[in-house]
Image (cartoon, helix red, strand yellow):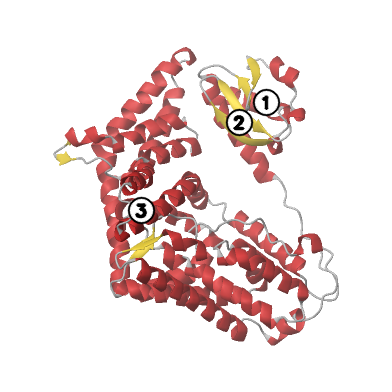
Amino acid sequence: MSTDKNRATAAAILPLVGGPDNITSIAHCMTRLRISLRDRSLVQDEALRALPAVLGVVEDDTYQIVLGPGAVARVTPEFEALVEEARSAAPAAAPSAPPSGGITAGDLAAQGAALKEAQKARNATPFKLFLRRIANIFVPLIPALIGCGIIAGLNGLLTNLGWVPAVVPALAAIASGFMSLIAVFVGYNTAKEFGGTPVLGGAVAAIIVFPGVAKIDAFGLELKPGQGGVLGALAAALLAVYVEKWCRSWVPEALDVLITPTLTVLISGLVTLFGLMYLAGEASSAIGTFANRLLAGGGAFAGLVLGGLFLPLVMLGLHQALIPIHTTLIEQDGYTVLLPILAMAGAGQVGAAIAVYYRLPRNASIRATVKSALPAGFLGIGEPLIYGVSLPLGRPFVTACIGGAAGGAFVGLFHQLGVAFGSTAIGPSGWALFPLLDGRAGAGITLAIYAGGLLVGYLVGFVATYFFGFTRQMLADLDTDPGPDPTTATATEAPPKERVPA
């Protein structure tokens, strides 16, 4: 079946299931395209059954369109691409005009949303889109990393205190089980994200953690189970996707279900064993060595730079490149030393927002937005404050970065003094990071240093914003009573709360 025919089939199916906005998820099995729907009533069942390529439809927990073996694996990527193209082409709603009499929180929210959409458009470069796809591989793993990280911290606490020794081995198994197989999950998600069969990506990545690799002599280089870690799993699964697509370009549909999986696993597996595991292992070791030496030798300066630039990195979409680095460090050392430093950017943001609150005593609308977004900010959820307050105002965004730089320098200095610590998981920051902290100096010192960094970030962000975050003209325009806000229903709501990934 040619690519044009597959795309034509996908294009014929899409409007009959309610269009791209009616679809919440897409997957496929051996013979069926499986989609989750927002509104089942929009599906035209009889028209779907009448399509020549459709062998039938089945309704279960998902809506399933039977296309047959071989065909479904070729049509599904085309269907996903059409849905993504349609969503990307949808025009963004224009912000409403500001009311007369002053600037409200609604105006800032609209301006922030416009800035966010403009930034998304600028981020649509091939490199940044690739980074976004890499992030999509690791973000679904964050809940398990958080849960296992907290259990690991609890286990360490019980071990140090000598309490309930019988429970300690059980907690160790629960906390470590996921990390021992994280390569498999990375491989599965990589294949899914890049248009391959997820389980084949997982199967190839599983080779990396298989104990039997220790018996393999790869050109005189001894392999160890887990060598290469998540980077090796990502590379192996990505290779498997390209091998699978290559196979589907020439294997007859009748033989696809036998030949394509076999060749995909065999070719990708051999390359992984005799090349990728060693190369990825060297890369992983280099990342760990560089991060630790960077903070040990120049921790204060490194923390200043990392804490100060993290919010702009988020704006540019480049922070996504850090996610596999965090995961690699967690896999190697048990924690990532970078995340507590990067979390200081959120502290600077909180301090800046508090200063905005006190500098605009007459603008009840903006003050209400700050009050509603601050609790999320303390827990490390940065977007409500970024896009609802500091970024639309301009200068407070810069002073927030100054606060983040000060907090990062404080934490980095202690790394330089030999008190290394980090987070056992990625995702949370702010106060939510406390349960995930771990380090060589003990829980008390680790928690105290991180809390000190937050306080420095809050204080410097507040002071910098209070004294340098506003010009006289800005205060004249902003520190007024704007009157009733016509967007009251949403004025105090910033864009949807999203945790800024570290």
Asked whether 314 or 57 is in front, the reply is: 57
The image position of residue 327, as x and y in percent, is 39, 52
| Residue 155: numbered disc | 3
- The residue lying at 33 percent from left, 31 percent from top is 268
Marks 3 and 1 in Cβ contact (< 8 Å): no
| Residue 13: numbered disc | 1
Q: Secondary structure at mark 1?
A: helix
The image position of residue 51, as x and y in percent, is 68, 17
Q: Which residue is mark 2?
A: 79
Q: Dot 2, how many residues are within 10 Å of its Cα: few (below 14), some (14-19), or many (20+)?
A: many
Instruction: Report if residue 24 is visible in the image.
Output: yes
Q: Is residue 488 shown left or right of residue 323?
A: right
- The residue lying at 81 percent from left, 76 percent from top is 102
Sequence order check, earlier mark of 3 and 2: 2
The image position of residue 236, as x and y in percent, is 35, 37
Query: Residue pushed farthest left?
Result: 220
Q: Secondary structure at mark 3?
A: helix
Mark 1 residue type: Ile
Instruction: Name the quadrant containing residue 83.
Output: top right
Mark 3 residue type: Asn
Instruction: Name the quadrant containing residue 437.
Output: bottom left
- The residue lying at 45 percent from left, 55 percent from top is 426
Instruction: Please name which of the two marks, 3 or 1, marks the residue nearer to the observer.
Output: 3
State whether residue 18 is above or below residue 57: below
| Marks 3/1: CA–CA distance | 52 Å
Instruction: Please name which of the two marks, 3 or 2, marks the residue nearer to the observer.
Output: 3
Q: Dot 3, how many residues are within 10 Å of its Cα: few (below 14), some (14-19), or many (20+)?
A: many
